[in-house]
Amino acid sequence: MEKTTDVLIIGSGIAGLYTALKVSKFANVILVTKKEKTESGTNYAQGGIASVLDGTDSFENHINDTLVAGAALCDRERVEILVKEGPEHIRELMEIGTRFTMSGNEFDLAREGGHSHARIVHAQDLTGREVERALVEYVSSVPNITILENHLAIDLLTEHNIKKLKNSPIDSRHCWGAYILDIENEKVIKIKACATVLASGGIGQVYLHTTNPAIATGDGFAMAYRAGARLSNMEFIQFHPTSLYSTGTSSTREQAFLISEAVRGFGGILRTKSGDRFMGKYDSRLELAPRDIVARAIDSELKKEGEDFVYLDITRKPASEIKVHFPNIYEKCLSIGIDITKDFIPVVPAAHYACGGVIVDSFGSTSLQFLYAAGEVSMTGVHGANRLASNSLLEALVYSGRASAAIKKQLETKSTVLPQIPDWDEAGVLTPDEMVVISHSEKEVKQLMSDYVGIVRSDLRLERAQRRINTLFEEVEEFYKKNKVFSSLIELRNLVTCAYLIVKCALLRKESRGLHFSLDYPASSQDVPSDTVIRNKYQKS
Ligand code: FAD
Ligand code: SIN
């Protein structure tokens, strides 16, 4: 089956929905999302959106904080765009009905690690849920946006799908849509589009312990890589310092509960299991140092003490204030017997955010013509080697807005003739009877990444991971070619590809910078810092 549209958007988090909102003003949109429409990383965002919204703060302050957190690797021009265009998008969210926490007529601005001012707009500690609610409500009411739930994008349509164009040079490739698995009907359809937007979110599920939901299997990174787009800085995986410690479940796709950085911004103190405050040994900004520093400090304390968790202590703040600011965290902890107004919270770092991704220009265009990327899957250059807290939702808004402007220009100035592309070929493929292969391989890739490609790395560990991942990659490709496609197989293939990309970029970086810390190169290089760039030379599909 084939559908055609002006713009195909893959993903229904903040980036996909906000792009749909903007693009629907001048074009028809099909938005596909692999689960129900609210399920996304966005839906779990707690702390909020960083933006300069009060007279005591300034754009320059926010720009500087972002550059400092990014360890000299941010693109200053892109950061300026991010910061200066932020406030107008926050107002636009409010216009469509997003309700942020206010203090009278002013925003109740919170503070988080790495920020010199309180500048986080939030909706209590459930900001993502509120933003997602407002966007889903708005977008669902727009007639020229069709949302297809339970539709999973498998691969992008490019020249490599067309026999006579298969060998066309990678630098002149186009994207004309995607093959999509209709999960309920177990059918692969083809959606052709003049412009395609990857807004497929993060990658956290490549690790055992992550704050990311089950959907975060890095599909967009892997699809873009297979299609030949350029990716960058995949080694910079941000570990959030404070996820709630749990003894774990047996599920393959665990999601760790986040204890927002706003808790530290509110006065939370990190303590060892014996009760000692330790951040003073690591950074003069103490608990409010940028995330890479705090996560590494916790990792080091855990290794030194041989413990499984440290504590976050907010008990010195009035109980009534804690409950007002953090109702979600309070309730969640209480449900497992921890009263955060009286008890310390056991926490550990968890994989949280991919700072690298599919390289885009300042208007969201990737290196493939007619393919755009926005949100966590994209690499706009604003995060450098370590994202500043609450800059992700902001980036998704600002750069989705800009991608929409570029799509408008494309549709107005370039007439796109969509070529004939063959239907998905299912001839001869088997129905798999060995599901254990999938779950076992997924656990294996997570274990490898957690053991060898975590907060502290070395060449030896990375090379070990690389060898094993290469084998896993081949095993999964073989399985993929023989069997009928289904969600967990497609996602496993993407997870293994993402693991490969992270390790490959990590091996390219011969220094420690931001989130990438190597025992073999413990200092930052004295050379002008540069991005790692990776691209698939051999088209696989
Ligand atoms: P997502 O919101 O993750 O949406 C991706 C969408 O793509 C989903 O709908 C998914 O189902 C869909 N999808 C994926 N693959 C496919 C496919 N193959 N086919 C079809 N659909 C697909 N950032 C901040 O700035 N502030 C915060 O306070 C904050 N708190 C956070 C708390 C948590 C627990 C987490 C996990 C992240 C937090 N972040 C925060 C980071 C931020 O939420 C994410 O980076 C951001 O929401 C990503 O938005 P997105 O639109 O790019 O992706
Ligand atoms: C948090 O609330 O700590 C998450 C903020 C972020 O990821 O930027």
Image: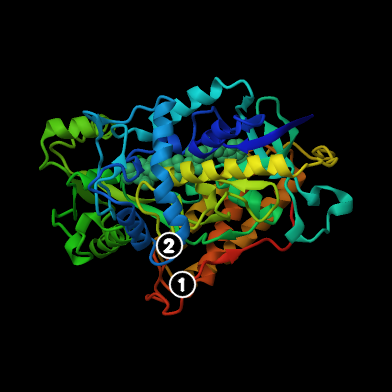
Q: Which residue is mark 1?
A: 529
Task: Name the residue: 44% across, 74% down.
Answer: 511
Residue at point 43% right, 56% down? 79
Whether tag 1 and tag 2 are in contact, CB under 8 A, the answer is: yes
Position above or below: 263 against 535: above
At a point 46% along the width and 59% down the height, the residue shown is: 77
Nearest to viewer (mark 1 / mark 2): 1
How many labels were placed on the picture?
A: 2
Q: Nearer the viewer, residue 382 or 463?
A: 382
Residue 69's spot in the image, x, y percent? Answer: 35, 60
Residue furthest toward the right?
A: 164
Q: Quadrant of residue 286?
A: bottom left
Indicate whether 425 appears above or below 223. Answer: above
Label 2 CB less than 8 angstroms from ligand 2: no
Secondary structure beneath dot 1 equals loop
Q: Which residue is mark 2?
A: 385
Name the residue at 28% across, 45% down: 119
Give the answer, above or below, for where 440 lies relative to 148.
Answer: below
**CA neighbours of label 2 inside 10 A, class few (<14), some (14 to 19), many (20+):** many
Assess disc 1: are there few (<14), some (14-19) or many (≥20) residues with their C-alpha within 10 Å of its C-alpha.
some
